[in-house]
Image (spheres, grey):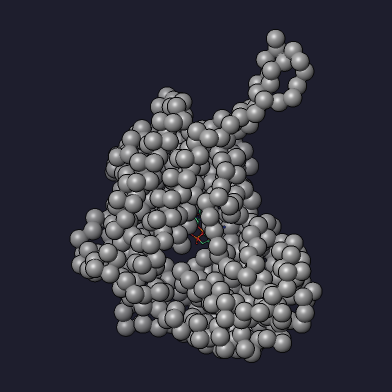
């Protein structure tokens, strides 16, 4: 089906949602301000989108609070909430073509990835939490004989979900699934680069039967709409995914307002460690290449630091370089494309700035390093691998968020682990080894929320995702994600 659709033709006629979705419908913004949405595949203006301000955010929060207090969702029987969220998931799949197209137009990711990955992943996430709703039990605590003591979880109330542009639908679904399943009302703020699918979600949720006001979507700028949510006195919790820098702002907003709960899924500089005893360098090379070039490297857990033992480095570099060829950037609307554009000109310039910094600090490019497909007007950078990187260089310390791999050569297991952990981040890490002993030693030694052994970027809704250190706290996915959207209440009944 993917191959048979003329995506360019569809792109000309698709409706681009560009107004806030509040209280069950699209509305005009109070602000009357707009911001431009550009297709990064060719740099053309797609549409102007409403830029919500404090008054718009307040309207959305009031709508969410009203729905929450009315109990239309928060007190609905779990089995009924389950039915509605399952329908929501089905509608996401039923609108797969349109959602995939909107995502590609917003962020320039290959249409095949949006169609087969992002849409399906988001639908799967909503369905997973729908299924969980009526299967999670409270507790009866072991207290005195004349007491019955229940420990229950209650929804926190109004949740703000503030998400980034690299996986707009998945990141929104990771917040909406557990927050809605547990009975909260939500105000979703998509990244300014990627408002379309979030707005469409608002529409589909209503069609699925979600009561008006339970899901509101406010497109807008971070320092205006995002900040207004962070500082709002009637928002009880923020589920945030984005940069460490903005994550720190949300901690401050919380302290400056109502001490709202904050869940942070932040950036990373994840190590891909290939030990000298690795017995499948082909698999390691494929994992390393996909780990940094998939989604144009705009991935929070991208394996952006390759830490390789000197004994195998030359062979491994040859194999990774060969793998990188399959990631040459192409037209995002072509079903065969494996790597698309970067999200904006600004992001492309930022990544090119890091490439310059790498060269200036003495690292050498094995491949890549340039902007390509310039004639299209789009924002493309070829897969880039830096050799002779030291872990104190800028390209080894800072999150580049582009298709740039920094390779650091080490001697032996201990040095590999030391370099892997010498970072302020702790989102993820991987080790490639043929030794069972080293697999276990490395899995324990790497300080990160996720460690992959002889694989990379495997995920499942059943497994929590999130980081250590400045990669944040709180977890998305799995039943653990429900914790941050609920308050624990103890009820004592004297007999
Ligand atoms: P940002 O932190 O810049 O933005 C994330 C969200 O926060 C956006 O909606 C943004 O709005 C908003 N925002 C920006 N500034 C403020 C502010 N001052 N106050 C309140 N809200 C604000 O991240 P990016 O969108 O650039 O996404 C990339 C980052 O996300 C990377 O660091 C990446 O590692 C991280 N990420 C982490 C993941 C994880 O699970 N750990 C997963 C995916 C990405 P606006 O768009 O208008 O600026």
Residue in the image at 53% along x and 86% along y? 321
Q: Residue at x 66, y 86 (%)?
A: 313
Instruction: Tell me if residue 208 comes above or below residue 153 in the rendering.
Output: below
In this picture, residue 242 sits left or right of residue 431: left
Residue 381 is situated, as x and y percent measured from the top left of the image, at 44, 79
Q: Is residue 491 above or below residue 465?
A: above
Q: Is residue 439 left or right of residue 208?
A: right
Residue 439 relative to residue 224: left or right:
right
Residue at (43% x, 71% y) in the render: 342
Looking at the figure, which quarter contains the C terminus? top right
- The answer to whether residue 36 is visible is no
Picture residue at 44% right of the left edge, 81% below the top: 326
Left or right: 40 in relation to 320: left
Q: Is residue 424 visible?
A: yes
Quadrant (top left, top right, bottom left, bottom right) of the N terminus: bottom left
Q: Closest to the observer: 454 or 374?
A: 454
x then y, percent, for residue 331: 33, 75
Q: State the image coordinates of residue 332 (x, y, percent, origin top left).
A: 34, 71
Rendering coords of residue 415 (x, y %): 78, 76
Please tell me whether residue 303 is drawn above or below residue 362 in the rendered image: above
Numbered circles on residues, count: 0
């Amino acid at each position: 089906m993917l191959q048979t659709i003329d995506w360019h033709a569809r792109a000309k006629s698709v409706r681009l949602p560009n107004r806030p979705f509040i209280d069950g419908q699209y509305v005009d913004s109070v602000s009357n301000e707009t911001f431009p949405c550009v297709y990064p595949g060719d740099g053309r203006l797609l549409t102007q989108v409403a830029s919500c301000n404090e008054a718009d955010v307040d309207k959305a929060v009031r709508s969410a609070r009203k729905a929450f207090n009315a109990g239309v969702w928060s007190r609905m029987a779990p089995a009924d909430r389950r039915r509605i969220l399952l329908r929501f998931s089905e509608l996401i799949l039923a609108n797969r073509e349109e959602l995939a197209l909107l995502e590609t137009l917003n962020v320039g990711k290959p249409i095949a990835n949006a169609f087969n990955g992002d849409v399906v992943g988001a639908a799967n996430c909503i369905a997973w939490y729908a299924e969980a709703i009526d299967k999670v039990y409270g507790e009866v605590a072991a207290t005195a004989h004349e007491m019955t003591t229940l420990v229950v979880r209650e929804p926190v109330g109004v949740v703000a979900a503030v998400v980034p542009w690299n996986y707009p639908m998945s990141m929104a679904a990771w917040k909406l699934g557990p927050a809605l399943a547990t009975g909260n009302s939500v105000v979703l703020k998509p990244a300014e680069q990627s408002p379309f699918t979030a707005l469409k979600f608002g529409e589909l949720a209503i069609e699925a039967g979600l009561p008006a006001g339970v899901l509101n979507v406010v497109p807008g700028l971070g320092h205006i709409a995002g900040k207004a949510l962070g500082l709002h006195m009637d928002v009880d919790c923020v589920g945030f995914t984005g940069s460490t820098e903005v994550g720190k702002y949300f901690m401050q907003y919380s302290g400056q307002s109502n001490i709202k709960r904050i869940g942070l899924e932040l950036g990373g500089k994840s190590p891909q460690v290939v030990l000298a005893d690795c017995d499948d360098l082909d698999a390691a090379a494929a994992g390393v290449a996909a780990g940094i070039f998939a989604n144009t490297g705009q991935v929070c857990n991208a394996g952006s630091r390759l830490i390789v033992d000197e004994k195998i480095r030359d062979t491994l570099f040859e194999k990774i370089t060969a793998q990188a060829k399959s990631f040459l950037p192409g037209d995002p609307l072509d079903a065969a494309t494996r790597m698309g554009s970067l999200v904006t000109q600004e992001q492309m310039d930022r990544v090119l700035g890091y490439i310059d910094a790498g060269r200036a600090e003495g690292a050498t490019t094995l491949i890549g390093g340039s902007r390509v497909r310039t004639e299209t007007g789009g924002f493309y950078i070829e897969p880039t691998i830096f050799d002779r990187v030291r872990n104190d260089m800028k390209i080894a310390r800072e999150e580049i968020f582009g298709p740039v791999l920094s390779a650091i050569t080490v001697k032996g297991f201990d040095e590999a682990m030391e370099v892997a952990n010498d970072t302020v981040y702790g989102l993820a890490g991987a080790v490639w080894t043929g030794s069972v002993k080293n697999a276990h030693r490395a899995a324990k030694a790497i300080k990160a929320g996720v460690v992959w052994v002889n694989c990379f970027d495997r995920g499942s809704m059943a497994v929590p995702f999130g980081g250590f250190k400045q990669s944040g706290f709180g977890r998305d996915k799995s039943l653990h994600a429900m914790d941050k959207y609920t308050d624990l209440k103890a009820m004592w009944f004297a007999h």
